[in-house]
Image (tube, rainbow, N blue to C red):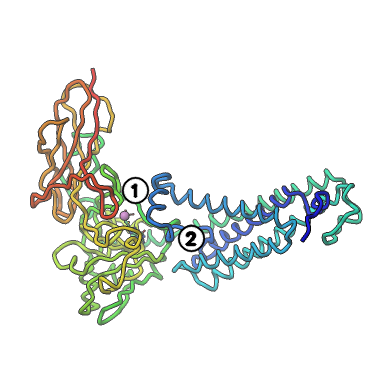
């Protein structure tokens, strides 16, 4: 291949026409994917599927860095990044495609294959439909590219100086080239039209997808929930004295949310089945009706994320309604040698814990309700696991699809190969909720308060230290069980100056909260939470 003189390059279209054509065509590809996603629950969006792939394959360090940088916007940033990179690849393809005619179709085939493979990883996806959708999307992308490329050549052929020198394929414009400016405007109009179509299709796809929400089905389940002791459990509130103290029961809307799902799985409760299998005598399945007709119990349990930092808010206390996991497993008959319970979600996420966790009288539920309502969609509707005393990453499977018995050595849950401890008991932890760190107060008694938790061992005492002084016991609120957090308060007299307030807790057996400091990886942060208050006139 020899170098083509510069003037000759021009009849392949200017670079910007290539770039715009390529980017707009990729936009069409992505948008068609969104439309299919909107049309069928069994066709995931290729963008989301690639994002899922990214999340699942990211190593522990990357995940941590990303979360440190973007916090809970991490998934949004990921999606924006995937779209931006795709569009850039499209633009680059358009530019290079002016010289290498084989490249754009090849890139669209590659996009289609990548999308199809990513979509195929999703357990909620239908493989056939997923492939069909990405192939159609790639075809639409490539056709859009061809359309714009031809428009772009018309623009070029309109340039009088170039009209004699023609290596590419003929097009209609060749015989009587329109004025150059007219032709450029014409290309810009087409490109804008294609881009606008892509945006419309993408928005339409997301809108359709939104309509596929199962919130109506959830409302129907609400009507079938038996009245629960829930929400109304009377607990003496110590919090009134301290504005800003967490309520004993965390309202659903304020409950922390942690999971790997980019879009909340929409599980139709009427189609949903819970499979119980693995090393059991009698595998079987349960419908939601089976569960609702079962012996439902209400249990107040505090759950927490292992990624909760000292002082963090990835912890909450709710009344969970469900059937005891032990009853579910008893019916299947656990085989000898099975010493791990593994929960699997509809989106393929897994968590496992030792069967002996179920030996005592600890709460372990297949839960269908949270604070008297069906589980919110983001918290695992229609069913999830809740195991008191274990961090969520080893136990609290949302959008539960299956429960499997296996041996401890034969299976590791999702986070274990990603650098987290295989066992995840919740550590004794305490937190100051109020007043705010760094806030100003007038001298005198200042109400301070917070929560402390050590499910299932219960909190026996909470102590507060003012500056470098003695540790003094705080007042504790009532609890309904040892599986929940406890509210604590105190009203120390504070004089003018800067004061540091520190908190620590003990469980009911007298074991102190570990002082650390230790980072959250691999098995949960350790250390005392402290805040600074400014007291002035
Ligand atoms: N399907 C699924 N379930 C999941 C997770 C997940 O990523 N996917 N994350 C777990 C983790 S790490 C935690 S801390 C809890 C959080 O539950 P919440 O979002 O209801 O507070 O859910 C657990 N269940
Ligand atoms: Mo977590």
* Image quarter of residue 174: bottom right
Q: Is residue 208 left or right of residue 375?
A: right
Q: Of all residues shown, which one is farthest toward the bottom?
A: 281
Callout 2: SS: loop
- The answer to which of 241 and 202 lies nearer the viewer is 202
Callout 1: SS: helix
Q: From the viewer's perspective, is residue 497 above or below residue 54?
A: above
Q: Earlier in the sequence, mark 1 or mark 2?
A: 2
Q: Is residue 184 left or right of residue 130?
A: right
Query: Label 1, on which residue?
Result: 253
Mark 1 vs 2: CB contact within 8 A: no
Classify 10 Å Cα crowding around label 1: few (below 14), some (14-19), many (20 and above).
Answer: few
Q: Marks 1 and 2, how far apart in space?
A: 21 Å
Give the image location of residue 434, x and y in percent: 24, 35
Q: From the viewer's perspective, is residue 154 above or below residue 432?
A: below
For the C terminus, give its image quadrant.
Answer: top left
- The answer to which of 316 and 480 lies nearer the viewer is 316
- Residue at 88 percent across and 54 percent down: it is 165
Query: Label 2, on which residue?
Result: 212
Q: Judge whether residue 223 can be spotted in this image.
A: no
Q: Is residue 32 left or right of residue 282?
A: right
* Image quarter of residue 39: bottom right
Classify 10 Å Cα crowding around label 2: few (below 14), some (14-19), many (20 and above).
Answer: some
Q: From the viewer's perspective, is residue 405 above or below residue 523?
A: below
Give the image location of residue 144, x and y in percent: 70, 58
Q: Is residue 181 left or right of residue 361?
A: right
């Amino acid at each position: 291949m020899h170098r083509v003189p510069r003037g000759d390059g021009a009849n392949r279209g200017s670079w910007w026409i290539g770039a715009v054509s390529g980017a707009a065509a990729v936009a069409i590809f992505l948008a068609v994917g969104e439309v299919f996603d909107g049309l069928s629950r069994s066709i995931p969006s290729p963008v989301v599927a690639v994002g899922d792939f990214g999340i699942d394959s990211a190593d522990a360090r990357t995940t941590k860095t990303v979360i440190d940088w973007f916090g809970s916007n991490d998934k949004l940033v990921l999606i924006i990044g995937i779209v931006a990179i795709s569009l850039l690849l499209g633009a680059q393809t358009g530019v290079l495609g002016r010289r290498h005619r084989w490249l754009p179709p090849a890139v669209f085939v590659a996009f289609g294959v990548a999308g199809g493979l990513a979509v195929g990883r999703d357990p909620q996806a239908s493989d056939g439909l997923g492939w069909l959708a990405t192939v159609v999307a790639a075809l639409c992308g490539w056709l859009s590219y061809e359309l714009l490329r031809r428009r772009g050549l018309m623009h070029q052929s309109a340039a009088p100086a170039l009209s004699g020198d023609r290596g590419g394929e003929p097009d209609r414009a060749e015989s009587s080239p329109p004025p150059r400016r007219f032709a450029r405007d014409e290309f810009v109009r087409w490109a804008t039209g294609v881009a606008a179509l892509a945006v419309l299709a993408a928005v339409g796809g997301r809108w359709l997808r939104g309509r596929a929400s199962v919130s109506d089905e959830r409302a129907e389940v609400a009507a079938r929930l038996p009245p629960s002791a829930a929400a109304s459990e009377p607990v003496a509130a110590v919090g009134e004295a301290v504005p800003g103290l967490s309520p004993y029961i965390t309202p659903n809307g304020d409950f922390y949310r942690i999971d790997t799902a980019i879009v909340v799985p929409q599980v139709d409760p009427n189609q949903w089945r819970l499979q119980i299998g693995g090393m059991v005598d009698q595998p079987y399945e349960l419908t939601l009706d089976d569960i609702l007709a079962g012996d439902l119990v209400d249990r107040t349990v505090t759950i927490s994320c292992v990624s909760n930092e000292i002082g963090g808010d990835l912890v909450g206390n709710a009344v969970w309604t469900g059937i005891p996991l032990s009853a579910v497993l008893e019916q299947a008959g656990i085989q000898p040698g099975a010493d791990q319970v593994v929960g699997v979600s509809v989106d393929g996420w897994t968590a496992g814990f030792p069967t002996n966790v179920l030996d005592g009288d600890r709460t372990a539920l297949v839960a269908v309700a949270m604070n008297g309502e069906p589980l919110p969609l983001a918290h695992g509707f229609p069913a999830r696991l809740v195991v008191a005393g274990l961090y969520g990453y080893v136990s609290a499977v949302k959008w539960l699809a299956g429960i499997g018995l296996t041996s401890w050595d034969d299976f590791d849950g999702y986070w274990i190969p990603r650098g987290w401890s295989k066992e995840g008991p919740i550590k004794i932890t305490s937190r100051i909720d109020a007043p705010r760190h760094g806030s100003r107060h007038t001298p005198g008694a200042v109400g301070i308060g917070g929560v402390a938790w050590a499910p299932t061992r219960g909190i026996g005492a909470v102590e507060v230290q003012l500056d470098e002084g003695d540790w003094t016991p705080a007042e504790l609120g009532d609890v309904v069980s040892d599986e929940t957090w406890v509210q604590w308060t105190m009203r120390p007299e504070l004089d003018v100056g800067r004061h540091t307030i520190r908190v620590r807790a003990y469980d009911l057996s007298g074991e102190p909260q570990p002082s650390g400091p230790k980072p959250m990886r691999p098995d949960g942060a350790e250390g005392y939470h402290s805040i600074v208050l400014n007291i002035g006139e």
